[in-house]
Image (cartoon, rainbow, N blue to C red):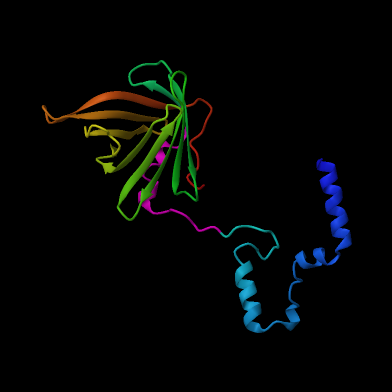
Amino acid sequence: MRQVFFSAMIVALLAAPGALAQTAPAAPADPHAMSRRDLEAEVRAQRPYLRYSGVVAANRPVGCREPESRQFDFWLGEWEVSPTGASMILAESSITLADQGCVVLEEWRPFSGASAHSISAYDAASGRWRQAYAGSGGGWTLYSGRVDGGVLRFDNESSADGQRQRMNYQRLDADSVRQWGETFDAARGAWTVTWDFTYRRRPGSLPPSTQE
């Protein structure tokens, strides 16, 4: 049936040669016949895609280079993750910089449990960091926070019961980062640690460049 269809289509096109001519793209204008205004408009339209060397390349913006956007760079790298104070490795995590240095991407790979990804970026309009976290467990969590006393603290904005929760990141040294979660105990008026991880740079890996 498919072969019959294509044969019939070819016959129809041969019988109506004007059909192909009607769909053919118009020839580009002769530059010698174009006005200066039209020539300038053409150059402006092509400039984002053409370099003077003739190589096609997108003319991307410089990206995020302000100091606030670099506050999370200490988390970049290839990590082995352990409960703080223990040597057992429970997960691997890859943290990379994307989109001209504006976005921090996390790939969380636990040896048991749900894998996940997060995307973090500094929101200059609000002066806060934003993070969205989702994974194979089906959950979706949104965070918002800022640097406080050398710790990047993210408040959980997706808590269903209204209980205050937050997640914290702290650079320990060039090759280790602490990440821990807390829940606010209203009765005591204090934060209680609910989980606590230490990221150690994977042997053989180097701190990545912050120039994406």
Task: Say which of 131 and 72 sits in front.
Answer: 131
Task: Say which of 71 and 184 sits in front.
Answer: 184
Residue 48: quadrant of the picture: bottom right
- Image coordinates of residue 92 in percent, x first then y, are 47, 25
Question: Residue at 60% across / 71% down in the picture?
Answer: 44
110 is higher (above) or lower (below) than 72: above
- Image coordinates of residue 46 in percent, x first then y, are 64, 67
Q: Is 181 on the left-hand or right-hand side of 78?
A: left
Q: Is residue 192 visible?
A: yes
Residue 182: quadrant of the picture: top left
- Image coordinates of residue 120 in percent, x first then y, are 40, 42
182 is higher (above) or lower (below) than 48: above
Q: Is residue 72 magenta?
A: yes
Task: Say which of 84 and 57 sits in front.
Answer: 57
Q: Quadrant of the N terminus?
A: top right
Question: Residue at 52% across / 30% down in the picture?
Answer: 205
103 is higher (above) or lower (below) than 110: below
Q: Is residue 152 visible?
A: no
Which segment is the magenta one? Answer: 60-79
The total of numbered circles placed on residues is: 0
Q: Is residue 66 magenta?
A: yes
Question: Residue at 43% across / 18% down in the picture?
Answer: 89
- Image coordinates of residue 209 in percent, x first then y, are 50, 43
